[in-house]
Amino acid sequence: MYKILHKEKLNDVVELMVVHAPHVARKCEPGQFIILRVGDDGERIPLTIADYDREKETITIIYQIVGYSTKALSLLNEGDEITDFVGPLGEPTKLHASKHVIGVAGGVGSAPLYPQLRALAQMGVEVDVIIGGREAQYVLWADEFRKFCKNVYITTDDGSLGRKGFVTQVLADLIEQGEEIDEVIAIGPVPMMKAVVAVTKPHNIKTSVSLNPIMIDGTGMCGCCRVTVDGKIKFACVDGPDFDGLQVDFDELMARQRMFKEEEHQMDEKANRMCNLMGGVQ
């Protein structure tokens, strides 16, 4: 069992947990993820590692409350224990000693992007970040990124914080201004990552994306997380989650993500009933 040492609500749908997980903390690297389970009958939830502390033996995860399993996770509090916490899984991010890297994060994409950009900064790479959210409360970890990023650009759909609009508009402007960019790392909703690639591809800018498709076992055996990259079948859980964004078939990925919408709706209704019985999500 894995004890929750700290829990924090970041906004109305996103929470942070610091979990005591010695085995994972000793071995994990930026870009890797864990799969956790709440209760013996709980579903497996894949979550990218947002931060880790080898000395304290802790892993930080950030998750969005979107359905039955994440609502069950949200009902846990500091001192409670998570049944399973398996990892580190996936391939670590391939960090290159470039001159200038720009990270682009949408929503909870800030979580997996954070350790990658921090590691690059520690290597002496100049890093900037563009963070986007629907409104101000959904812009995550801007202050954390400011600790090592040269520039932090913020966009919101409604203009409540930073520039009104989308992250791609800032990226396009930087390219248009002649900014020399060795690599872009984009993490967030699939449509956002697809849009980022649409901006970088005409300029042949190396673009890495982190994919989080439907995933069950985390070993590649179930085949649920398959994606097409450069015309070849890959499995996000073992070959990724990072891939060359210029080669990803985003349309196929988005179609696969819609496959289980009805089942997800049914589980969400079950979660709402559970929360009502327990007095709501804490």
Image: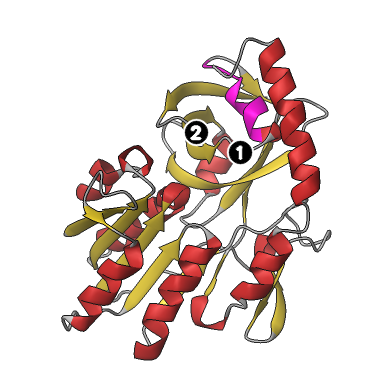
Secondary element at tag 1: loop
- Coordinates of residue 85 in the picture (x, y in percent): 65, 36
184, above or below 22, in the image: below
Name the secondary structure under disc 2.
loop
The residue located at (39%, 48%) in the rendering is 134
| Coordinates of residue 33 in the picture (x, y in percent) | 58, 50
In-front residue for pair 239/225: 225
Q: Position of residue 273 (x, y in %)?
A: 74, 20
Q: Quadrant of residue 82?
A: top right
Question: What residue is shown at x 81% (from left), y 64% (from top)?
Answer: 223
**Which comes before the other along the chain, label 1 or label 2?**
2
Residue plotted at (68% across, 73% down): 252
Q: Which mark is residue 66?
A: 1
Kind of residue indicated by mark 2: Val
Tell me if residue 170 can be seen.
yes
Q: Position of residue 210 (x, y in %)?
A: 52, 63
The answer to whether residue 206 shows anywhere in this view is no
For image coordinates 24% across by 63% down, the residue present is 128
In-front residue for pair 151/114: 151
134 in magenta: no
Q: Are marks 1 and 2 in contact (CB under 8 Å)?
A: yes
- Label 2, on which residue? 13
Which corner quadrant of the image does residue 36 belong to? top right
Check disc 1 and give the amino acid type.
Val
Quadrant of residue 160 in the image?
Answer: top left
Separation of marks 1 and 2 at Cα, in angstroms: 8 Å
Left or right: residue 132 compared with residue 107: left
As drawn, the residue found furthest toward the front would be 158
Residue range highlighted in magenta:
70-78
